[in-house]
Amino acid sequence: MKTTLEIPDVIFRRAKAKAAGRRISLRQFVTEAVAEKLDGKSTAHQKSRVRLVGSLRHLRSNTARINALIEGEFEKVEPEE
């Protein structure tokens, strides 16, 4: 199906450059991008998020320790009358 879309110039140039870098047509690139979005897949975004979260994994123990300290302090507070 043929259609016309208005895409901001900056996005259009980025898409065209990305398509050229992958050696595919802009039409194929846009089709794949829309299909990924409809399927809920955004591989680059997912990979960067996984990489970020994975790099913060070491903080879990610190977070648990801080939460325990906070809970302990709140237990010491006497309720107001």
Image (spheres, grey):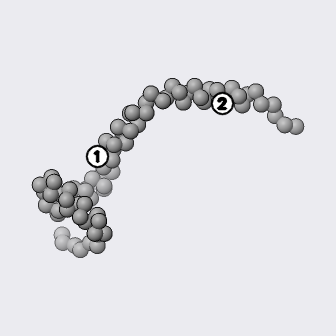
- Foreground pick, 75 / 17: 17
Task: Give amino acid for label 2.
Answer: Ile
Q: Quadrant of residue 47?
A: top left
Who's the residue at 43% across and 30% down the image? 57
The answer to whether residue 57 is visible is yes
Q: Quadrant of residue 58?
A: top left
Inspect this view and state whether residue 30 appears.
no
Image quarter (top left, top right, bottom left or bottom right) of the C terminus: top right
Mark 2 vs mark 1, CA separation in Å: 38 Å
The residue at the point 41 percent across, 37 percent down is 53
Residue that badge 2 annotates: 70
The residue located at (27%, 53%) in the rendering is 36
Q: Position of residue 80 (x, y in %)?
A: 84, 37
User: Where is residue 61 shown, x and y percent of the image?
Assistant: 51, 25
60 relative position to 11: left or right: right
Q: Is residue 33 left or right of residue 28?
A: right
Q: Amino acid at mark 1?
A: Thr
